[in-house]
Structures are given as C-alpha cells and as structure tokens.
Image: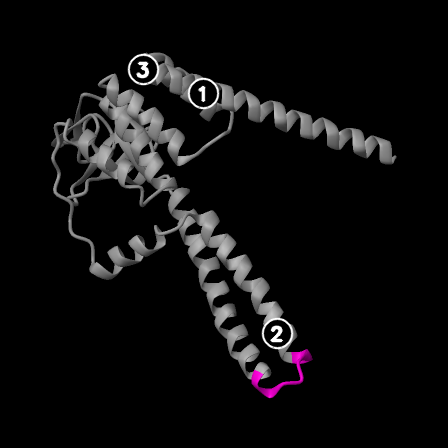
Amino acid sequence: MYKKIIILILVVLSFQISFSQNVKQLTDSAEIYYTKMNYEKAVEQYKKVLQSGKESGFLYYNLANSYYKLNKIPDAILNYERAILLIPNNKDVQFNLEMANRNITDKIEAVPEFFIYSWWNTFLGIFSSDTWAVISIISFIFTLTFIFGFFFTGSYILKKISFWLSIVLFIISINTFVFAQKTKAIINNHNFAIIFEPVINVKSSPGDIGTELFVIHEGTKIEITQTSGDWIEIKLANGNKGWVKRDLVEII
C-alpha cells in the first residue's frame, strides 16, 4: 500500500518537473525569437505556454509586446489588458497599453470615476489576490500566536500587549481576506472585451433591423452589460450604449 502511494507521488512529481521544464523551454524559446525579431514565432511560443495552463501577467505582457511589434494592435491591447488584471500596478504594462491605444481610431473620453471608487481600486491593485491572501494567512497565524500568549503568559503587561495585538492582527486578517476576494473577483470579471472588427455599426436593439446609433473601430475596449442570443449590449467608457454581435469581440 505504502509503495503504491510512494510510486504515485513520484509519478506526480516527475510529471510536474517535466511540465515545468517544458514550459521553461517554450518561454526561453519565445524570448529568443523575440530578441531575434522573429515576432510571429515568439507569439506562437507564448501562446503555447498559455495554452498549457501556465498564466501570468508577464506572459501576457510579452505576448502583447510581440503582437505590438507585428502591428496587430487589437491583439496587443487585449493582452496588455489581461496583463494588467494580474499585475495592475506595473508601470511598463500601463505605458505600453497607453502607447497601443494611441494607434486605434476611437479616442473615447472616459466618464470620471467617483474619487472614492478610484482610490479603492488603486488600493486593491497594490497587491495581487495571492499576496493579499498570504498577508491574511500570516496575520491570522500571528493572531493565534498572541491569543496563545494572552492565555499562557503570567505578565499583566504581556497579556495586555497580546490582547490588543491579537485584535489588530485579526482585523488585518479579515480585511486582507476581503481584499483578496475582491481582487480575485476583478480578475474573474469577464464583462470587458476588445473590438476585433475594423468597423462596427452599433445598433439600438439586438438584431440587424435595429437603428444604427454610432460606429466603433477595432481595438476599442467595451463593457458587456447584457446578452441576447448572438448579440451583446455594450457600454463605452463615455457611457454610450448599443448592441453588436458577440463574435466581433474578444473577452479580456
């Protein structure tokens, strides 16, 4: 019985090691292609890494850079946006996304966010969801440690310090757990997309017979507010709404 368990563990470990080595080879290969300015091959290799299940902000960032070099602006914007979800405060990603957006037709002025909401999103973006979760776990462990100290120390001063520190750390643990959940929810929110059609006539209702409201172009970021069959209602950064076909956009 124990031998079977050990063999199973060894098989799993060998599979994980083999998988990691394969991913590293693909990543290294993509980087070599990129430095040699073979951007088509770099894209191919980065996509293989992502298709294997390995995902990171820097992988999306490098893929976006490769697309940008190929002048495939919608693909570049899509992957810069995906990178920002995972590494929200990375200045390089933000800068390159801004540069890519200068190459699209639609220059849409966003409706200003309420300042508290903007501050909240900026604060959440300080760390990734995994980092917030780690802070929460560490804070909780220290909370238990100080609770233990409170009950088993004989010193009144140490009891008082342990009591207040355990309360503070417990509050930190709860709050950072909430931050981790909120950050993860933002990452898993698939309500935003990029237009992948050169020109789209946005309709007043789902269907070809709807009135044409306005025109948008490839590379524009939109928010999906509802769906109806093969059609989605989209919202632009300036608040304008309308309907387009679902297959004309790519979800971020």
Residue interval drawn in magenta: 151-157
Q: Quadrant of residue 97?
A: top left
Task: List x then y, in percent, for residue 200.
Answer: 18, 25
Q: How much space separates mark 2 and mark 3, taking CA atoms?
A: 57 Å
The colouring scheme, among rainbow, by chain, secondary structure or one colour, is one colour
Q: Is residue 21 above or below residue 114?
A: above
241 or 108: nearer the viewer: 108
Q: For the residue labelled by badge 1, is the local secondary structure a helix, a strand or a loop?
A: helix
Q: Secondary structure at mark 3?
A: helix
The amino acid sitting under disc 3 is Tyr
Foreground pick, 104 / 194? 104
The residue most toward the right is 1
Q: Which residue is mark 3?
A: 39
Residue drawn at point x = 31 percent, y = 45 percent: 89
Q: Quadrant of the N terminus?
A: top right
Mark 3 touches mark 1? (CB < 8 Å): no
* Residue for point 74% across, 29% down: 10
Earlier in the chain: of badge 2 and badge 3, it is 3
Q: Name the side, left or right, on which 210 lies relative to 227.
A: left
User: Residue 108's image quarter?
Assistant: top left
Quadrant holding the C terminus: top left
Q: Mark 1 or mark 2, which has the lower sequence index? A: 1
Percent of width and height locating residue 128: 41, 47
Question: Residue 121: where, in percent of width, then height?
Answer: 30, 53
Q: Amino acid under label 2?
A: Ile
The one of 112 and 54 positioned closer to us in this rendering: 54
Taking the magenta stretch, the answer to whether it contains residue 156 is yes
Against 17, is 235 above or below? below
Query: What distance separates the C-alpha of mark 3 from that of mark 1?
Result: 14 Å
Left or right of 211: which side holds 96?
right
Q: Which one is in front in this view, the residue at disc 1 or the one at disc 2?
A: 1
Residue identified by numbered label 2: 147
